[in-house]
Each structure stands twice: as C-alpha cells, then as structure tokens.
C-alpha cells in the first residue's frame, strides 16, 4: 500500500506543533491549519511533478543527499520549535534554498496563493513553506530508510505512488505550481529495461556490437559533458560586518577563489567553512565572485545559493534587499532564480511576543510593577514605517497586558515610552514617538485599564540602545519601552 505523503506531512504539522506554529507566527490557529491543508498537497505535488520529468528524480535525490535528508538525522518539527523563534528561523533559513530549487520562479506565486487560500499574511505563508519543505524531505528520507534504504529507486517508488492522493487539489493550486497535466503526477519514468533472455542464443553478435557502441558513446560524451551531479551550495551571512560563510564546491581552485574573495571584501580575518566534493557541479559565476562579495557587504545580508536557486534574507530593509537583489541579478545566468529568504525581523518579533506573553502569564494574581515592565519589555511592537497604528499581530499582547494591569497594586503608575531610530527629521521622530506611546496607552485604557495607571511619553531618537548604522540596530531602537513612572499620570 502506497504511503500517503500528504497525510504524513499534515500529521507532522498538526496537534501541538500547529499550536506552536500559530503562536510563533502570530496567526490564528484555525488559519494556520487551513494553510497546512494547502501546503501539504502543494509540496507533494511539486515533488511528484519534478520526479515525473526527465532527470528530475535524480536531481531530487541528489538534492536530498547533499542537504542531509537521508534519514540519518531524523528530528521532529515539534522539538525544533521548542527552541522558539530561533529554531523556526533556522529551519526556514534551511528551507529557503530548497524551496527556490524545487519551485524556481513559482515560489512567489505559490506564497501568494497560500496567503489567499488560508487568510494568513504573506510573510507567514513564506515562513510556513520554508519550514515545511525541509520537514517533508526529512520525512521522505526517514520513510525510505525504514522501508528498504535511501536509494533513488526507493524515492521513485515512494513518489510514484502519490498520484492517487493528488486527484483533488485545492482550487488554484495547479495554476500556482504551473502543473497542466495532473495525470503525470506520480508517474515516475521507469529505468531502461535489461536485454531480454530472448536476445541470447545464436544471434548474440548484434547485441555485443550494440553494447560496445553504447560504451563507446558513453565514453565519448563523458569527456565532453559537464562534470558533477550535485548542485553547489554557498551560504554567506554578513553578521554586522563579520562574515559567516560555508560552501560545498567542486575543487580546490574554487575553494581558494571564494576564500580569497571573502578576505578581499571582509578583511584577512574572514574564514569560510568549505567542503570539496568532485561530484559537485562547476560554479559558472566564479569569475564574478568579487562582485558578489561586494554586493553582500551591507550588514545583515543573508545569501543562500543552492544550484541555480538563490534566496536573499536577513536583517535588511526592503530598500537594501531590493538593491542587493538588483546588483546580484546581473552577475548570474538568467536561468538562476531569486527568492526571498528568512525575514529575521519577523521571526524575532514573533519570538519576542511569545516570551512576553509567557512572562505575563507567570505573574499571577500578585506582582510588583517592575515585574510587569520587565515582561512587557520582552515584546516588540513592529509599527509600520511612519505609522502609529498598532499592528494586528500585537493586539493579543495588548489585551493580555490590560488584563494584568487591571490587577496592579494600588498606586502603580507605568510609563509607556516611545522611541525611534535616527532616520529622518528629529522633530518628526519626536512627534512619531509620542504618537506611538499614546496609541499603546489608549489601547490599554480602551481595554479597561484606568487612565491613572498609565502615562505616555515620547523620546524620539534621543535614547538609542544600539547603533543606528545597521538595520538590526535601527530595529532595536524603534521600540516601546515600559518603566515605573517617576511622575504620576494625569
């Protein structure tokens, strides 16, 4: 009986794991469940479609092998998410190049389809896809290992049995995936049949000659075909000006060229953890490596390449992400696809909110004011640029804070302080910080907190907690900070 991979992935993403995902993403659990119902058939259909194309099965098997999804490192998604937003961010980061490799130019369209289908945000849809891709490949590798071994033939047999489960895909999914013939899903090309016994006997000379000619042809083409069957992988992270680099490349000259370029761009202290494997395909853009490194000198950039698929993420503003992408596109072959990598700000915001909610829940019925401010200062309210409107994903935090504050000890007065980065006009920043602080105060009083408990103040860009020279620093400086008020509220 064929293994139903859709059911397998849906189960892995369900139950307690679903609740964790909803919390980390800041999305309603019901909508995340709907999204999982779209992701599972989408990814299984993608794999089945790839396996049904000429050479696609071998490419997919090599991708799993080179990425470590061979069933030897099985780990449940739930245990990964126990690490909070950091665990999710790591998994999404690993899934980003996999998605780009599997979907190519279809990744953005599938993300938009999933957001519309489920009602979750586009960023949440991208994150879910990013973590579901490695989860499915991990399940595939584990299933193969348990049922006969991690081989290309086993992968073909497993994907070849999915056709029966892919007959009724959600509306619009086939268009998003670019699949025009559902009957091809699950049809994996069979290996070339061996010479039949009937060929033996008195008429064997033609077969010997044909065999020799085939060997000769293989020898002739082997000397001219591109060497390597495994896609090269390159990871370059600019961690506040310090490079974190790793790669799997074909030969020592490629390794030396990448290391020399890293040192040229980031200084002699730069290192790169690289593995040399002669089965890796040659890197066609190596002559542009210095320009690639130069484009990644913006602090916070996270560049991931897997074969002909590139993702760009990290601590970057939208403008910087676009600028780097524009610089890089001209350095690679037009066949190379570009996709969005993990948005570390979004992951950090979700993680921070969950920590704040947990700290508020732990306060109990009797607490000190400084315990409340410490809990709330764990959170990040990510206002849109130039806006004082509290985003939807922070409303549950405000609601919980109001419940707690209504039981605060008599005489408690909490200051809600607004802060900005130093981008733009200082006077405008001062006004914006005041508006944001008042927005939070007003939301809390609207939820029932007495006005005498809260005072709002704006500090503009006068009290930074990090450098304003990087996106990560500016992210930290744009904040609402809670403190015990030194003057009473009016």
Image: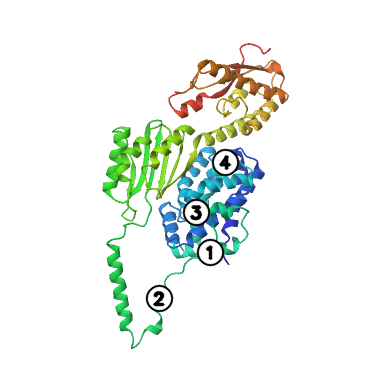
Q: Nearer the viewer, mark 2 or mark 3?
A: 2
Tell me the SS state at disc 2.
loop
Task: Mark 4 or mark 2: name the one nearer the start of the chain.
Answer: 4
What's the distance in space between the residues labelled 2 and 3, CA to CA? 31 Å
User: Which residue is labeled 1 in the image?
Assistant: 184
- The answer to whether residue 416 is left or right of residue 260 is right
User: Which residue is labeled 4 in the image?
Assistant: 122
User: Which residue is labeled 2 in the image?
Assistant: 194
What's the distance in space between the residues labelled 3 and 1, CA to CA? 21 Å
Residue lying farthest to the top in this orientation: 487
**Are circles 2 and 1 on residues that touch, CB within 8 Å?**
no
How many labels, in total? 4
Tell me the SS state at disc 4.
helix
User: Which residue is labeled 3 in the image?
Assistant: 137
Badge 4: few (under 14), some or many (20 or more) residues near its Cα, within 10 Å? some
What's the distance in space between the residues labelled 3 and 4, CA to CA? 23 Å
- The answer to whether residue 58 is left or right of residue 478 is left
**Are circles 4 and 1 on residues that touch, CB within 8 Å?**
no
Question: Where residue 460 sits in the image (x, y, percent)?
Answer: 54, 17
Tell me the SS state at disc 1.
helix
Q: Quarter of the image containing the N terminus?
A: bottom right
Question: Where residue 319 sits in the image (x, y, percent)?
Answer: 47, 32
Question: Where residue 370 sits in the image (x, y, percent)?
Answer: 61, 21
């Amino acid at each position: 009986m064929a293994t139903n991979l859709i059911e397998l992935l849906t189960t892995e993403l369900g139950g307690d794991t679903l609740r964790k995902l909803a919390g980390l993403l800041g999305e309603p659990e019901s909508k995340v469940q709907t999204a999982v119902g779209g992701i599972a058939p989408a990814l299984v259909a993608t794999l089945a479609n790839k396996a049904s194309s000429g050479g696609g099965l071998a490419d997919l098997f090599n991708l799993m092998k080179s990425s470590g999804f061979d069933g030897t490192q099985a780990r449940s998604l739930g245990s990964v998410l126990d690490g909070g937003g950091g665990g999710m961010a790591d998994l999404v980061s690993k899934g980003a190049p996999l998605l780009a490799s599997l979907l190519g130019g279809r990744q953005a369209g599938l993300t938009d389809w999933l957001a519309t289908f489920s009602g979750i945000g586009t960023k949440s849809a991208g994150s879910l896809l990013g973590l579901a891709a490695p989860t499915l490949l991990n399940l595939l590798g584990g299933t193969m290992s348990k049922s006969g071994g991690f081989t290309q033939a086993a992968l073909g047999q497993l994907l070849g049995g999915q056709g029966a489960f892919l007959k009724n895909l959600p509306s619009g999914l086939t268009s998003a995936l670019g699949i025009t013939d559902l009957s091809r899903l699950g049809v994996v090309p069979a290996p070339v049949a061996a010479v039949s016994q009937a060929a033996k006997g008195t008429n064997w000379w033609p077969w010997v000659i044909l065999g020799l000619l085939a060997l000769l042809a293989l020898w002739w083409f082997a000397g001219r075909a591109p060497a390597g069957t495994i896609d090269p992988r390159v990871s370059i992270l600019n961690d506040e000006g310090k490079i974190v680099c790793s790669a799997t490349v074909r030969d020592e000259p490629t390794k030396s060229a990448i290391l020399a370029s890293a040192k040229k761009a980031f200084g002699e202290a730069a290192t790169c953890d690289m593995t040399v494997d002669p089965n890796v395909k040659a890197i066609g853009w190596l002559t542009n490596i210095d320009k690639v490194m130069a484009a990644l000198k913006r602090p916070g950039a996270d560049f991931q390449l897997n074969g002909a698929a590139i993702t760009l993420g990290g601590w970057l503003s939208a403008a910087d992400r676009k600028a780097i992408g524009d610089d890089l596109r001209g350095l690679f072959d037009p066949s190379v696809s570009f996709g969005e990598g993990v948005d570390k700000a979004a992951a950090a915001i979700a993680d921070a909110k969950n920590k704040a909610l947990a700290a508020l829940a732990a306060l109990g019925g009797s607490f000190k004011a400084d315990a409340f401010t410490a809990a709330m200062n764990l959170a990040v309210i990510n206002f849109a640029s130039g806006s004082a409107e509290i985003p939807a994903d922070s409303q549950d935090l405000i609601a919980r804070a109001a419940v707690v504050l209504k039981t605060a000890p008599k005489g408690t007065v909490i200051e809600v302080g607004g802060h900005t980065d130093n981008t733009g006009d200082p006077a405008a920043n001062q006004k914006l910080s005041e508006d944001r602080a008042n927005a939070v105060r007003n939301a809390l009083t609207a939820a029932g907190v007495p006005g005498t408990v809260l005072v709002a103040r704006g500090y503009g860009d006068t009290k930074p907690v990090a450098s304003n020279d990087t996106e990560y620093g500016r992210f930290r400086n744009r904040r609402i900070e809670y403190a015990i008020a030194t003057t009473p509220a009016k």
